[in-house]
Amino acid sequence: MKIYAFSDEAASGLSEQIAAMKRNGLDGTEIRGVNGRNITALTVQEAAETLRQLKDNGLCVWSVGSPIGKIPLDGDYAGHLELLRHTLELANTLECANLRMFSFYLPEGAKPESCRNEVIEKLAQMAEIAADFGVALCHENEKGIYGDLAVRCAGLLDAVPALRCVFDPANFIQCGQDVPEAWKLLGPRTWYMHIKDAMADGTVVPAGQGIGHLPEILADYAARGGEAVTIEPHLRVFDGLRELERGQKTALQEGVYPTEDAAFDAACGALRKLI
């Protein structure tokens, strides 16, 4: 199994991220932050230089950890499509065939069922654009968006066959979703996993230390032929976390890990113990 990580949780700078990945024996990154900037803010030339540095160190880009789809459903969709096209161009430059994305924040007071058709219509259009670039859109379950619960994630996969599934156990826990039930529904359709565990109160902990059933799920994922996982530590505050949360605050352990490097190494070590 190939092991990647959100390396921006180890450090903001790319050279420090590379050192952390090599130290932990990882295959590459799910690229999200580079030198303090979100991946979508890079130019094509900067992306090419980023890939060169990664390749020089035997690393690759598995997926673009983009914020695509993490906007209000009634927000600036046309502008967002332009950002999608730019991000897909970056994915091509980074020699990456996967782009992690989301299924929109719902308008205040709106019921998910009333938004279903619009969400599907927009995701289908986005998937069609991505196909022109040869990149797969990989939908991650996330608190606060339409696809927060497993049944809605499954519905999106049914309605937009081009979508792929990213399974994040901790995010399901934070939404009150039973993780084994979610895995029963989505496991056979999961393209890759985010390795993030949580306690019942939603606090993120290293893999295997929460109620995410990571040992059983990882074993089943491997038995089904699963080939890739991305470690997403979320064990302490890191550069860019506030931007990622967009008001959906993540419960983190406080004072356990003295540095971002220490938290990153702990997350990698916890996964190694499970596999």
Image (cartoon, grey):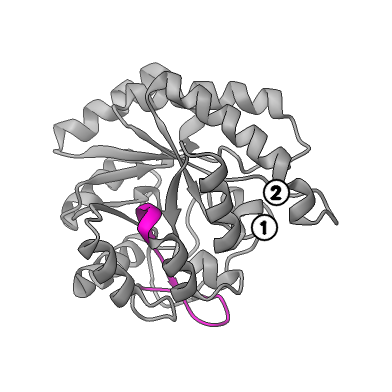
Q: Residue at x 47, y 40 (%)?
A: 163
**Magenta residue check for 84:** no
The disc, 1 or 2, on the residue closer to the chain's N-terminal end is 2
Any magenta on residue 203? yes
The residue labelled by disc 1 is 144
Residue located 17% across and 50% down the image = 22
Give the distance between the C-alpha atoms of the residues marked 1 and 2, in whole angstroms.
Answer: 6 Å
Quadrant placement of the C terminus: bottom left
Q: Say above or below: 4 vs 57.
A: below
- Residue, x 41% and y 20% (percent of image)? 133
The amino acid type found where label 2 is placed reads: Tyr
- Quarter location, residue 99: top left
Residue at screen point 66% across, 45% down: 104
155 shown above or below 204: above
Q: Which residues are magenta?
A: 188-206
Q: Please say if 250 is above or below 49.
A: below
**In this rendering, does residue 160 appear at all?**
yes
Examine the rendering and report whether any part of residue 235 can be seen: no
What's the mark number on residue 105? 2
Q: Secondary structure at mark 2?
A: loop
Looking at the rendered structure, the secondary structure element under dot 1 is: loop
Would residue 253 be found to the left or right of residue 217 on screen? right
**Which quadrant, please, contains the N terminus?**
bottom left
Near-viewer residue (269 or 210) = 210
Q: Amino acid at mark 1?
A: Gly
Marks 1 and 2: CB-CB under 8 Å? yes
Q: Position of residue 256 (x, y in %)?
A: 41, 77
Q: Residues within 10 Å of mark 1 (few under 14, many from 20)?
A: some
Residue 262 x, y percent position in the rendering: 31, 66
Percent position (x, y) of residue 41? 51, 28
Across the whole image, how many numbered discs are drawn on residues?
2
